[in-house]
Image (cartoon, rainbow, N blue to C red):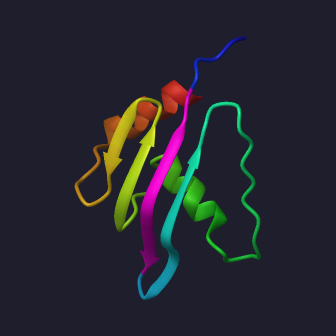
Amino acid sequence: MQYGSMSIQVKSINKSYGDTQVLHDVSFNCESGETLVLLGPSGAGKSSLLRVLNLLEGADNGQLNIADGAFDFSTEIKEKQGLALRRKVG
């Protein structure tokens, strides 16, 4: 099975649960064909970041460009946008 090229661009993602900030100004690019590893201790925010990338959870602010879609977390992201993204990336 062949997949089209896809890149991920994350800009200044911040995420808090109450008073606990789990993601602070996270930014990175991952181009098609690149391998990216998330490594850190328990509670470092790895799962939270993956949930934000799949639009399963929102971030407090920041931008995400993935699968030809641009998402700005300072505005409301509709559930149907998350469903469409997850269908596209699998």
Highlighted magenta segment, given as a residue range:
6-17
Task: Give left or right: position of 28 versus 35.
Answer: left
Task: Give left or right: position of 85 versus 61.
Answer: right
**What x and y, as percent, mark residue 25?**
46, 71
Residue sticking out furthest to the bottom = 19
Residue plotted at (48% across, 81% down): 21
Residue plotted at (57% across, 63% down): 48
In-front residue for pair 71/33: 33
Task: Give the tally of numbered discs.
Answer: 0
**What x and y, as percent, mark residue 76?**
24, 53
Q: Main secondary structure of the magenta part?
A: strand
Measured along the vertical axis of the image, is residue 12 above or below residue 43? above
Residue plotted at (34% across, 40% down): 70
Q: Is residue 12 magenta?
A: yes
Residue plotted at (74% across, 42% down): 35
In-front residue for pair 23/79: 23
**What x and y, as percent, mark residue 78?**
28, 44
Q: Is residue 8 magenta?
A: yes
In-front residue for pair 88/14: 14
Q: Quadrant of the N terminus?
A: top right
Measured along the vertical axis of the image, is residue 44 above or below residue 68? below
Measured along the vertical axis of the image, is residue 61 above or below residue 3? below
Query: Residue 30, located in which quarter of the rendered image?
Result: top right
Measured along the vertical axis of the image, is residue 58 above or below residue 41? above
Residue sticking out furthest to the top = 1
Q: Quadrant of the C terminus?
A: top right
